[in-house]
Image (tube, grey):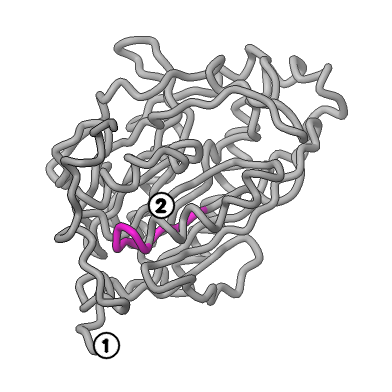
Amino acid sequence: MHHTKRVVRVAMTETADAYPHMPESVDEIDELEDRLDDVRRANVEHHLGLLEAAAAQGVKAICFGELFPGPYFALRTDPIWTALAEDATSGPTITAVRAAAKRHGIIVVAPIYELDASSGKRFNTAVAIDEQGEVLGTYRKTHIPFGRNEQGSFHENVYYEPSDGKNLLGPANVSNNPYFPVWQTSVGRIGVAICYDRHFEGVMGSLAGAGAELIFSPAVTFGAKSRRLWRLEFAVDAARHDVFVGGSNRRGAEPPWNQLYFGDTHFVGPNGEVLNVSTHANLVIADLDLGELTAPHAAGWDLRRDARPAIYSKRG
């Protein structure tokens, strides 16, 4: 069907821990205590290199991976990693990313390990930065998993708390829900759902209902069921809510845990998967036509018009 095109080139990273001097055994993790700044620096520099490569391919907005300044440490409970948490607007990671965003004129969603200085609490937080290097706001991961599957365990509740709804909400935020901000940017309206958030039915609906056109979902995930549902959940949410979704996952294994992450980073819209046009192994790049979101529905549906929410909570 004919519609007015609004094409924007966007990207996500697909990579793994870039620090080259990890210990050989998980029992030696504590040896990193005095080198956490080096761990962070290696990963930030790696991602800034990916940002530069994305900008060179014409990308206007990029999302880094979940907790990108370090390895995925929640596979065990090692207290040293809490020292990796930092301020979401003035810490070393965001200071460097803001400068790079401005230098390359690119919007960045940067998911970090946040330390809230006012409360002393830690969060898994995505920081949205515009092409001028200004912080648009933050999103704190709402749902925190802990459990085990056939490949390993995850203990995120040891390291950070679920969102308290006290996200940084600047004038670019167009959502009325403090837990789920949506930012009006020069390329469109962007929201974020981090990893485990994607499994909860209200999350994507809340973001889309607040006007999100593109939802980034950075994740670190592994295991057979996660792998099976990875594309299914995003595809259904994109079709159901008329939104583009970008799901990113680490790829490969990170010493010394050597847990295998399956990657499969991709973009999907209401009419299906969007082609990856990247020429870089650690970037997935897509040209999204946001005009599709307001075009007549390919199947003739109008789900928002025809929904009957009042009946959903009734019990027989």
Q: CA distance from mark 2 to mark 1?
A: 26 Å
Among the two numbered marks 2 and 1 on one chain, the one whose residue lies closer to the N terminus? 1
Magenta-drawn stretch contains 80: no
Q: Quadrant of residue 42?
A: top right
Residue nearest the viewer, comparing 3 with 24: 3
The mark closer to the camera, 2 or 1, is: 1
In the drawing, what numbered circle is on residue 1? 1
Pick the quarter of the image with the C terminus.
Answer: top left
Q: Quadrant of the N terminus?
A: bottom left
Kindly identify the residue that appears in the image at 25 percent across and 82 percent down: 5
Point out residue 14 in the picture as x, y percentages from the top left corner.
60, 55
Furthest residue in direction right, as rendered:
24
Q: Position of residue 298 (x, y in %)?
A: 31, 79
Q: Which residues are magenta?
A: 239-247
Name the amino acid, label 1.
Met
Residue at 65% x, 50% y: name it: 227
Front one among 131 and 26? 26
Task: Tell me the SS state at disc 1.
Answer: loop
Q: Find out whether the residues at labels 2 and 1 contact each other: C-beta distance under 8 Å.
A: no
**Position of 278 relative to 25 (above/below):** below
- Residue 68 at x, y = what percent? 55, 40
Is 16 on the left or on the right of 259, as rendered?
left
Asked if residue 76 lies left or right of residue 297, the reply is right
Q: Mark 2 sits on what residue? A: 216
Q: Residue furthest front?
A: 316
Q: Is 272 displayed left or right of 53 in the figure? A: left
Depicted 168 relative to depicted 158: above or below:
below
Name the residue located 57 percent from the left edge and 58 percent from the top edge.
265
